Image: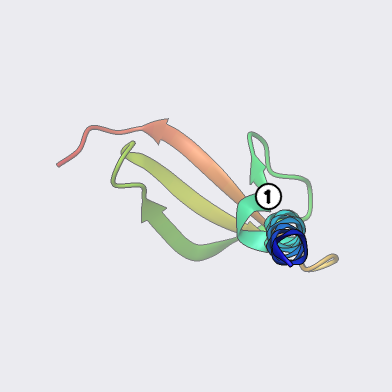
C-alpha cells in the first residue's frame, strides 16, 4: 500500500514539474522583445518608463506589419 501512495505522490510531483516548465516556456512576459536596435518600419509609442532598479529608460516601439512590440533600453540615467 505504501508503494502505491509513494508512486501517486511521485507522479503528482513529476506532473507538476512538467506543467511548471511548460508554463515557464509559454509565458510571454519572460520573452519580451528587447532590442539594441529597432527594426525598420517600427513606430515609437508614447510608452516610456524608467526601471527603478537600474535607472534605465525603456521606450516601446510597435511594428504595425507584424504587431510585435520592441523594448529599447536607453543609456542608464542617474536616479533622481
Q: Position of residue 50 (x, y in %)?
A: 34, 50
Tell me the quarter of the picture where residue 29 sits.
Answer: bottom right
* Residue 32 appears anywhere in the view: no
The extreme left residue here reads 80
24 horizontally vs 4: left or right: left
- Residue at image coords 63%, 34%: 36
* Residue 34 appears anywhere in the view: yes
10, 2: nearer the viewer: 2
Q: Position of residue 67 (x, y in %)?
A: 77, 68
Q: Position of residue 75 (x, y in %)?
A: 42, 31
21, 73: nearer the viewer: 21
Quadrant, the C terminus: top left
Total marks in image: 1
18 horizontally vs 24: left or right: right
Tell me the SS state at disc 1.
loop
- Mark 1 surroundings: few (<14), some (14-19) or many (≥20) residues within 10 A: some
- Residue at image coords 23%, 32%: 78
Q: Position of residue 34 (x, y in %)?
A: 63, 44
56 horizontally vs 8: left or right: left
- The coloring applied to the image is rainbow
4, 29: nearer the viewer: 4
- Residue at image coords 74%, 67%: 1
The extreme front residue here reads 1
39, 9: nearer the viewer: 9
- Residue at image coords 34%, 36%: 54
Tag 1 residue: 33
Amino acid at each position: 500500500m505504501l508503494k502505491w501512495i509513494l508512486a501517486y505522490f511521485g507522479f503528482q510531483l513529476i506532473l507538476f514539474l512538467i506543467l511548471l516548465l511548460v508554463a515557464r516556456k509559454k509565458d510571454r512576459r519572460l520573452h519580451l522583445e528587447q532590442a539594441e536596435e529597432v527594426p525598420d518600419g517600427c513606430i515609437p509609442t508614447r510608452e516610456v518608463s524608467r526601471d527603478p532598479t537600474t535607472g534605465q529608460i525603456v521606450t516601446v516601439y510597435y511594428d504595425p506589419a507584424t504587431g510585435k512590440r520592441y523594448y529599447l533600453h536607453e543609456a542608464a540615467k542617474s536616479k533622481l
